[in-house]
Amino acid sequence: MLSQPSNSLLGLNLRELTNLALGSAQPAYRGQQLFDALYRQRIDRLDQVSTLPLDYRARLAEEGWGVGLPKIARQFVSSDGTIRYLVELSDGETVETVWMPEGDGGERGDGSEAGDEIEAAADVEHVERVMVRRSTICVSSQVGCAVNCKFCFTALLGVKRNLEAGEIVGQIAAVLRDRGVDPPLQRVNLVFMGMGEPFLNYDNFMKSVRLLVEGVGIPESRMTVSTAGIVPRIRDFGQEPVRPKLAISLNGSNDALRSAVMPLNRKWNLAELMKAAREFPLRTRERMTFEYVLIEGVNDAPEQAREVVELVRGMRARINLIALNPGTELPYRTPEQERVVAFREILVAAGIPAFVRRPRGRDIFAACGQLKKTMEVSPRST
Ligand code: SAH
């Protein structure tokens, strides 16, 4: 019986895989074969890489190499079709990854809304519905989170560790396998909005993005990363040649409010954050997204909507409003729908595109900010 592989191939890029092959006196193209098997085919065992000679597969295994695909430990299915996966890493830590069929994948490259194409395609005969369906995977970047936002469940865990690039890509590979979905033929959006702060695990996050673009075949235009507002990394991110779209979690319309719900605002305040946002080099037709979690009686008043208007005035921005997903461990409540609508109308009247995010998978604790190891709950499990 072979011992558990200790080295994970998933997470290595083409250059690293090529060097690995060369190190075993294999031809350089073995690197490309491994790359395709890992990211394009998304194999889960080395012996499935039929393009590699048997003796090389055996040698990799002897050296302790394995694919390193994380295991789906549990999955919870929501009445709205959302699936929350508990993904187990090689050291036994777990993170959560969420599948949202026809989810709120954010805006399309052309600035229109995600649902448009589904409706348009409904008239077209012979178009496989699955071809145009845009499912969204919400991906975690850390085990836990260090940012400590007062309304977020992941914050209650603290941060345990960063995820490796292979563990970030691995979540997506595991979910695509489970769903039987094959990009680029079948479209998926990725949102890096799960557990953790991607910009506090910047290098691994960016490496995973490149592997997803080059290997899995998901275009960067279908990816959005959300940050709590790590200003120096926002600036670095703007310089990346290949990068997802950027969303910034605003959540407060002035410094006092924002610091109360997001203590990191004391380190990088709104003036610094908005300066970085204004200087961010947007691509043609790209917009900056701001997310704003509406918390009853805290940041959901009309006056605060008017402050948001002033903050983003003149920017190529859109605002996603999220009514707080509540939970008993949190001292906050979710606003009435009318408050949410009124807040949005003030933004829209000022010419700012603003959208109310549908809560997805609330019944299985899969909605924004609800991700943590909610093993104590017992939703419908498959
Ligand atoms: N750390 C990153 C990404 C993870 S959070 C960030 O802060 O942006 C993803 C989004 O969920 C953020 O916009 C965050 O403000 C929001 N969120 C967190 N807790 C929430 C809750 N309880 N209800 C609704 N949205 C929440």
Image: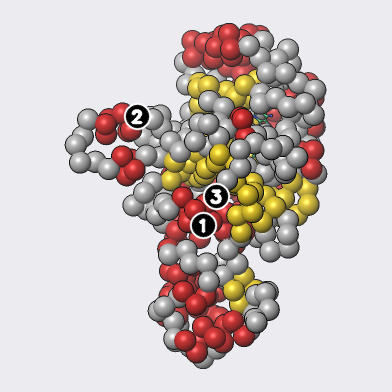
**Residue sitting at 80 percent across and 29 percent down?**
329
Which image quarter holds the N terminus?
A: bottom right
Image location (x, y in percent) of residue 371? 67, 39
Image location (x, y in percent) of residue 340? 59, 14
**Would you say the residues marked 3 and 2 are in contact, meaning their CB atoms lie under 8 Å apart?**
no
Ranked by sequence position, the earlier of labels 3 and 1 is 1
Q: Determine the CA span between mark 3 and mark 1.
A: 27 Å
| Whether residue 54 can be seen here | yes
Q: Nearer the viewer, residue 282 or 367?
A: 367
Considering only vertical position in the picture, is 300 above or below 87?
A: above
Q: Determine the CA span between mark 2 and mark 1.
A: 27 Å
Q: Nearer the viewer, residue 176 or 318?
A: 176
Mark 3: secondary structure: loop
Q: Specify few, some or many for label 1: CA neighbours under 10 Å numbering under 14, 14-19, or 20 or more.
A: many
Q: Which label sits in the foreground, 3 or 1?
A: 1
Mark 1: secondary structure: helix
Which amino acid type is shown beneath numbered disc 1?
Ala
Q: Which residue is mark 2?
A: 116
Q: Determine the CA span between mark 3 and mark 2.
A: 31 Å
Which amino acid type is shown beneath numbered disc 3?
Gln
Q: Which residue is mark 3?
A: 239
